[in-house]
């Protein structure tokens, strides 16, 4: 505890010195981050393979490339982002001026996740640096190779008096959360998110929670056969191609019309084999299940007799290697754990409906998801999805792309989290927008008539309604 308090005290001293507020410091750290990525690309591929079995292509797409892109964007835009923005004032405030000035929160705690241990740890850090904060970075202990790599390498590139990397397990997390932070940014499960929020409440610390949930994919059967092949590729990529479904933005389950289910399942089977071969167990493109606890959790889902009976493709497991085959299930019970909890693994339930428009009620009757994916050409249906459901984001006719689009905010709503980041939104997340109003001492005239009476009071109320009262008071110098 004393060590953590000393670390936090050092960071606060650095922040008080004003060192991190300058555009020069921010740009130097962003350049250092770009250099870090360029120098250590192969090492990052190595540790991502050790922890999660990520193929270099997946590792670059979802991790290394995301950090490089984010750092380059922030470097090119940070000076513009941190400049005060002029505020518009009504005529009643004349003569006066206003502006909104972004300022850093101060000491920030960033808690990374295990499934994307590089990008979901360093991308928020880029936002915190751009905003001028000092930072403690806590990588997930569940990805030990990546955590050790970050702890050893980051101090060689970034300012060690302003940015600290602290490793450790649950005990270290608990100690960190007991400290008084100016901002906490957490990526992880809803269960741990509640713990983080409870701890933050003790100090009234603002929190960004990037959680998850059961993100559905809606498939309108009006798509033609050519489009369906593309759709199947995008579904398989979103479910199994990104950390084997161990991703908050992965498709959790699908909603289709009953008459369309068999065709969809056949198409998904062919696409899985096209992506991962006849024997996916031998594929180098499938991530491994993180650890024994996660493997057992997924295995317990499959052991339920009703769930087992709903498996229509895959389902084989190897307990020794912790392998679970890409698995498709048809209409598992809606009250089963696989349909109430986030799956976070290579299992894809398909739920059939009489009419695809019923998917709106199905989704809206459940906790708000992080993402909704909808494959449809029906513009009216699209509008209904947007207006009658709530989610962190909606992507039509594709999957996952919203995550790598820096011009869009990424974040959840309700139980899928709150707060947002990416691009300028990351800068905003780690900044306080300070309102500044400046007045002059002239003109200041003394009152020229007797105290108020009822008529004058009513007259002033009328003027106020039309926003002229401020100007009148300024010109006449009226006082209470």
Image (cartoon, grey):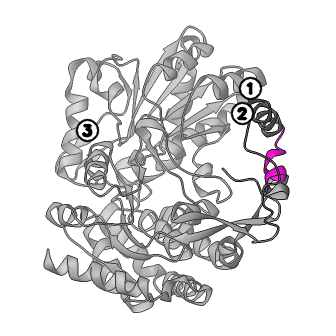
The percent coordinates of residue 128 (x first, y second) are 49, 71
358 relative position to 224: left or right: left
Residue 70 appears in the picture as rendered: yes
* Mark sitting on residue 224: 1
* Label 2 sits on residue: 227
Q: Nearer the viewer, residue 327 or 153?
A: 153
* Label 3 sits on residue: 298
Mark 2 nearby-residue class (10 Å; few <14, some 14–19, many ≥20): few
**What residue lies at 75% left-to-right and 72% top-to-bottom?**
441
**What residue lies at 72% left-to-right and 33% top-to-bottom?**
227
Q: Earlier in the sequence, mark 2 or mark 3?
A: 2
SS type, badge 1? loop
* Residue segment shown in magenta: 466-473
Vertical arrangement, residue 281 with respect to residue 84, above or below: above
- Which mark's residue is nearer the viewer, 3 or 1? 3
* Mark sitting on residue 294: none
Q: Nearer the viewer, residue 406 or 205?
A: 205
The answer to which quarter of the image holds residue 387 is top right
182 relative position to 429: left or right: left
Vertical arrangement, residue 71 with respect to residue 273, above or below: below
């Amino acid at each position: 505890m004393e060590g953590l308090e000393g670390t936090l005290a050092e960071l606060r001293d650095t922040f008080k010195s004003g060192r991190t507020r300058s555009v020069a410091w921010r740009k130097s750290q962003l350049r250092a981050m770009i250099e870090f990525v360029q120098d250590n690309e192969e090492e990052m591929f190595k540790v991502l393979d050790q922890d999660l079995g990520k193929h270099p292509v997946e590792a670059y797409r979802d991790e290394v490339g995301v950090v490089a892109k984010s750092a380059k964007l922030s470097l090119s835009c940070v000076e513009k982002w941190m400049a005060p923005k002029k505020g518009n004032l009504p005529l009643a405030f004349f003569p006066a001026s206003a502006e909104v000035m972004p300022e850093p929160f101060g000491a920030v705690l960033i808690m990374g996740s295990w499934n994307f241990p590089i990008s979901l740890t360093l991308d928020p850090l880029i936002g915190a640096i751009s905003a001028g904060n000092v930072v403690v970075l806590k990588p997930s202990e569940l990805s030990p190779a990546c955590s050790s790599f970050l702890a050893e390498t980051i101090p060689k590139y970034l300012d060690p008096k302003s940015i600290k990397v602290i490793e450790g397990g649950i005990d270290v997390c608990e100690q960190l959360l007991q400290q008084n932070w100016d901002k906490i940014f957490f990526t992880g499960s809803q269960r741990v998110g509640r713990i983080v929020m409870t701890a933050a409440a003790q100090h009234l610390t603002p929190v960004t929670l990037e959680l998850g949930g059961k993100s559905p994919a809606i498939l309108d059967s009006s798509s033609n056969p050519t489009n369906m092949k593309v759709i199947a590729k995008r579904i398989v990529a979103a479910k199994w191609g990104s950390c084997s479904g161990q991703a908050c933005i992965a498709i959790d389950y699908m909603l289709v019309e009953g008459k369309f289910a068999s065709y969809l399942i056949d198409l998904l089977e062919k696409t899985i084999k096209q992506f991962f071969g006849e024997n996916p167990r031998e594929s180098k493109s499938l991530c491994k299940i993180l650890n024994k606890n996660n493997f057992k959790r997924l295995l317990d889902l499959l052991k339920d007799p009703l769930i087992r009976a709903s498996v229509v493709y895959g389902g084989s497991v190897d307990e020794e290697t912790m392998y679970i085959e890409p698995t498709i299930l048809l209409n598992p019970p809606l009250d089963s754990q696989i349909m109430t909890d986030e799956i976070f693994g290579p299992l894809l339930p398909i739920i059939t409906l009489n009419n695809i428009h019923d998917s709106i009620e199905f989704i809206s009757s459940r906790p708000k998801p992080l993402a909704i994916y909808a494959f449809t050409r029906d513009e009216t249906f699209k509008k209904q999805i947007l207006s009658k459901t709530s989610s962190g984001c909606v992507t039509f006719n594709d999957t996952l792309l919203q995550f790598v689009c820096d011009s869009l905010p990424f974040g959840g709503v309700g139980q899928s989290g709150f707060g947002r980041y990416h691009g300028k939104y990351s800068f905003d997340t780690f900044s306080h927008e300070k309102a500044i109003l400046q007045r002059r001492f002239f003109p200041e005239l003394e009152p020229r008539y007797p105290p108020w009476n009822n008529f004058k009071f009513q007259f002033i109320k009328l003027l106020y309604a039309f926003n002229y009262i401020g100007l009148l008071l300024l010109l006449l110098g009226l006082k209470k």
